[in-house]
Image: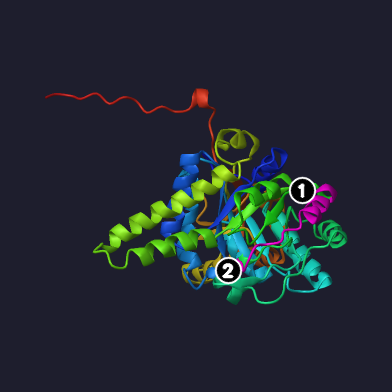
C-alpha cells in the first residue's frame, strides 16, 4: 500500500471515532517492530521522528530507511516530523520525506506561538504537507520527559484553541488536558469536560501527547472525546528497556537481543492499535487517502560558455535550489551524447504535486532563474512528471519465460 496523505488518514479516523498511533522511531529495531505491528493488525500507522531524539540517531541516515519501510508496507503509512524547534527544522523534515510536521512553540506565549505556527503552516501548505499545532503546555515529569519538557502543566483553554486554529490554519491540534511526557507520578487527572468542549468547538482531529501510562478505559474515553492521533514512545522504550535489564545475565548474542527487541516493540505497538480502534481499518483507510507521491521537475537546456564555467554554475544551482521547502533532491548533469539536442539538465524532485504551482514564486527559485539560468542558458524545456500508475486492468504483465533446450 502507498505512503498516504496524513490529513486524509486522520480525517477518516476522526469521522469513525478511532485513533491512529504516531509511534516514535529512534532506531531500525523500532522502525521494523512498528511496521510489523501495523501489518499484523491491518492498521494505518504514523511513523514519527522527533527532533528531541536526534541525539539517538542521525536523521539524514535514518529517514531514508523510514521512507523505504513506509513505501513497501502493506498498510497505509504517514511520516511525521515531531517537536521541531524552528521553521528551518520543519523544512529539514519535509525535505527529508515527512508529510506532517509539528514545530512546538507551546512554551511561548499565545501570540508568539500563533506567529511561529502560522509561519510554518504557510510554508508547509505550499508543499502539500499537513501541520500539527500545540496549545497549552505538556511537561515531562520523570525519565526522558523531565529533561526534554521542563516546566509546569498549562491546560489548553477553549477560547484560545478557537482563536489559535482560526489564525494559524493548522490541520490538527495537540491539546493539554492533564497528561505528561515520560512517566507519570500518581494517577493522572484528565479533564474530559475540557476535551469535550474543545472537540465540539473545533470539529477537527485532536492529538494526545504524553499518553504512555494511561489505562485502557482512559484511552477509550479520550478517543470518544475526539482524540484522533496518539503520540507514543515511553511505552515502547519501557518495554525494550525492561527486556534488556531482564536479559543482562543471559548468554545471548547481540543479534538475538536485537531480534527480540524488535518483537517486543511490535507486540506493544500492536496492543495499542487494537485498543485504540485502528486495527482492521487499513483497507477502508486506503480508499479515503490520496497517495503521497513525489513529482519530478525536469529542466533541459543548452548553455553558452565552457564546460568548467557551466559546471560551476550547476554546482551553485544545486546548493541554491536545495534550500526551497519541498525540494527533496536536485540533480544536475551533462548529456553523454555530444550531439544531443539539449546538453544540460537540472532535475528537481518535489515532495508533492502542490509544489508545481508554488515553487516558481519562491525567492530562491527567482534568484536561480535571474542570476544563473537566464545569463547562461539558451533554449530550455520544462516538464513536470508524476508517478505513472496504470489501471489495474491494463497493467503490464511480464511474459512467462520458457525454458529452452535441456
Residue 356 seen in the current view: no
Q: Say whether residue 134 is magenta.
A: no
Q: Position of residue 226 (x, y in %)?
A: 73, 47
Query: In the picture, residue 111 is in which quadrant?
Result: bottom right
Q: Residue at x 77, y 65 (%)?
A: 155
Label 2 crowd (10 A; few <14 / some 14-19 / many >=20): many
Q: Is residue 45 left or right of residue 248?
A: right
Q: Nearer the viewer, residue 139 or 360?
A: 139
Q: Nearer the viewer, residue 188 or 35?
A: 188
- Residue 291 in the image: above or below residue 31: above
Q: Secondary structure at mark 1?
A: loop
- Residue 387 in the image: above or below residue 233: above
Q: Which residue is mark 2?
A: 51
Q: Nearer the viewer, mark 1 or mark 2?
A: 1
Q: Which residue is mark 1?
A: 204
Q: Residue at x 59, y 62 (%)?
A: 93
- Quarter holding the C terminus? top left
- Residue 11 in the image: above or below residue 166: above
The numbered mark, 1 or 2, whose residue comes first in the sequence reads: 2
Q: How many marks?
A: 2
Q: Secondary structure at mark 2?
A: helix
Which segment did they paint magenta? 182-201
Q: Position of residue 50 (x, y in %)?
A: 57, 65
Amino acid at each position: 500500500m502507498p505512503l498516504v496523505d496524513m490529513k486524509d488518514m486522520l480525517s477518516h479516523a476522526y469521522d469513525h471515532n478511532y485513533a491512529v498511533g504516531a509511534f516514535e522511531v529512534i532506531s531500525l529495531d523500532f522502525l521494523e517492530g512498528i511496521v510489523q505491528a501495523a501489518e499484523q493488525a491491518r492498521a494505518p500507522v504514523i511513523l514519527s521522528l522527533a527532533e528531541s531524539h536526534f541525539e539517538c540517531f542521525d536523521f539524514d541516515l535514518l529517514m531514508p530507511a523510514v521512507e523505504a519501510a513506509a513505501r513497501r508496507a502493506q498498510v497505509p503509512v504517514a511520516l511525521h516530523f515531531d517537536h521541531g524547534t524552528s521553521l528551518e527544522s520543519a523544512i529539514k523534515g519535509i525535505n527529508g520525506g515527512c508529510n506532517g510536521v509539528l514545530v512546538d512553540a507551546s512554551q511561548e506565549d499565545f501570540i508568539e506561538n500563533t506567529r511561529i505556527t502560522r509561519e510554518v503552516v504557510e510554508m508547509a501548505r505550499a508543499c502539500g504537507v499537513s501541520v500539527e499545532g500545540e496549545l497549552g503546555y505538556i511537561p515531562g515529569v520523570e525519565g526522558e520527559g523531565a529533561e526534554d519538557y521542563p516546566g509546569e502543566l498549562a491546560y489548553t483553554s477553549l477560547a484560545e484553541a478557537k482563536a489559535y486554529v482560526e489564525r494559524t490554519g493548522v490541520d490538527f491540534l495537540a491539546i493539554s488536558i492533564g497528561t505528561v511526557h515520560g512517566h507519570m507520578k500518581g494517577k493522572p487527572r484528565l479533564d474530559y469536560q475540557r476535551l469535550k468542549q474543545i472537540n465540539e468547538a473545533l470539529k477537527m482531529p485532536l492529538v494526545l501527547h504524553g499518553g504512555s501510562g494511561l489505562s485502557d478505559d482512559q484511552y477509550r474515553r479520550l478517543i470518544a472525546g475526539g482524540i484522533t492521533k496518539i503520540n507514543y514512545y515511553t511505552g515502547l522504550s519501557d518495554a525494550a528497556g525492561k527486556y534488556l535489564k531482564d536479559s543482562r545475565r543471559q548468554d545471548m548474542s547481540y543479534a538475538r537481543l536485537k531480534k527480540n527487541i524488535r518483537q517486543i516493540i511490535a507486540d506493544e505497538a500492536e496492543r495499542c492499535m487494537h485498543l485504540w480502534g485502528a486495527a482492521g481499518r487499513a483497507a477502508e483507510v486506503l480508499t479515503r487517502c490520496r497517495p503521497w507521491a513525489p513529482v519530478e521537475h525536469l529542466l533541459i537546456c543548452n548553455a553558452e560558455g565552457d564546460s568548467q564555467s557551466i559546471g560551476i554554475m550547476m554546482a551553485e544551482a544545486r546548493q541554491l535550489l536545495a534550500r526551497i521547502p519541498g525540494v527533496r533532491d536536485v540533480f544536475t548533469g551533462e548529456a553523454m551524447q555530444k550531439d544531443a539536442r539539449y546538453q544540460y539538465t537540472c532535475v528537481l524532485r518535489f515532495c508533492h504535486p502542490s509544489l508545481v504551482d508554488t515553487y516558481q514564486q519562491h525567492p530562491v527559485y527567482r534568484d536561480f532563474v535571474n542570476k544563473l539560468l537566464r545569463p547562461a542558458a539558451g533554449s530550455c524545456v520544462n516538464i513536470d512528471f508524476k508517478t505513472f500508475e496504470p489501471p489495474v486492468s491494463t497493467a503490464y504483465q511480464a511474459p512467462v519465460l520458457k525454458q529452452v533446450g535441456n
